[in-house]
Amino acid sequence: MATVLLLRHGRTTANASGGLAGRQPVELDDTGRDQAARVGERLRKLPLAAVVSSPLIRCRQTLSIALPSLEPAIEDGLIECGYGDWEGQPLKELSKDPLWPVVQQHPSAVVFPNGEAMADMSARAIKAIRDWDARITAEHGPEAVWVACSHGDVIKAIAADALGLHLDQFQRIVADPASITAIRYTPTRPFVVRLNETGDLASVVPPRQTDSDAAVGGGSGGGGV
């Protein structure tokens, strides 16, 4: 089967300010644009069979900088989780909500107020990736490599499935801005070839407590923004 490179969008203005962007049309900041340019230098060396993107502008911006000569196909199944009433709120305030520890410890049970269930987000994202992977394999062969640009929590959910983990364990995975997680699906099982690959060892240094790159999923890059 083909190999999919799950690319998280670059840092956004919401990442920088500590807000939960959700499906709002937030854009990349200067750091995010630089991240997209740097990951593009690595991706352009590969014979990419296809490029697929979440419809949100931060993913489309990332790809337009990283791979300007390729037009991505838009896949609604890769859109950010629907955080409902949480969307646009400061993370430091959301962390006081009684739902916050459930999101961290038992996400499979979470339904965001006036939003989406995390289990539904996981299911539709996994289906989208597997469907695209089967299609690309059929068209380009098992050696094909393709890119899917999406969001932190979405990528973590797809990676957890590939690792055979329950969704309640997906918060153990980190997907930093502009990172690549590579998965190769086979008829018997998936193989996680790379996880949160940035090519930058600085990303292994834990952020200060006051840094605002964390998100719903926590961690250095977090998910959901």
Image (spheres, rainbow, N blue to C red):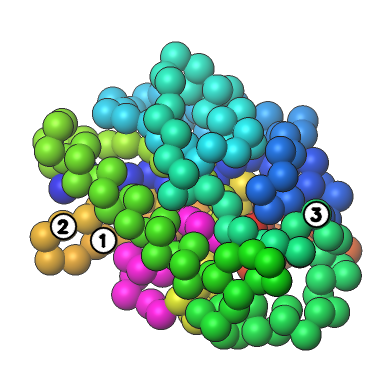
Q: Residues within 10 Å of mark 3 (few under 14, many from 20)?
A: some
Q: Which mark is residue 186?
A: 2
> Could you tell whether 27 is left or right of 40 in the image?
right
Q: Could you give the CA–CA distance between mark 2 and mark 1, rounded to whole angstroms?
A: 8 Å
Q: Quadrant of residue 32?
A: top right
Residue numbers of the magenta segment: 153-166
Q: Position of residue 191 (x, y in %)?
A: 26, 61
Q: Is residue 109 left or right of residue 124?
A: right
Type of the residue with mark 2: Thr
CB contact under 8 Å: marks 2 and 1 = yes
Counting residues from the N terminus, which is met first, the one under dot 3 or under dot 1?
Answer: 3
Q: Which residue is mark 3?
A: 88
Q: Residue at x 54, y 37 (%)?
A: 55
| Distance CA(mark 2)–CA(mark 3) | 39 Å
| 124 or 2, nearer to the observer | 124
- Can residue 218 be seen in the rendering of this structure? no
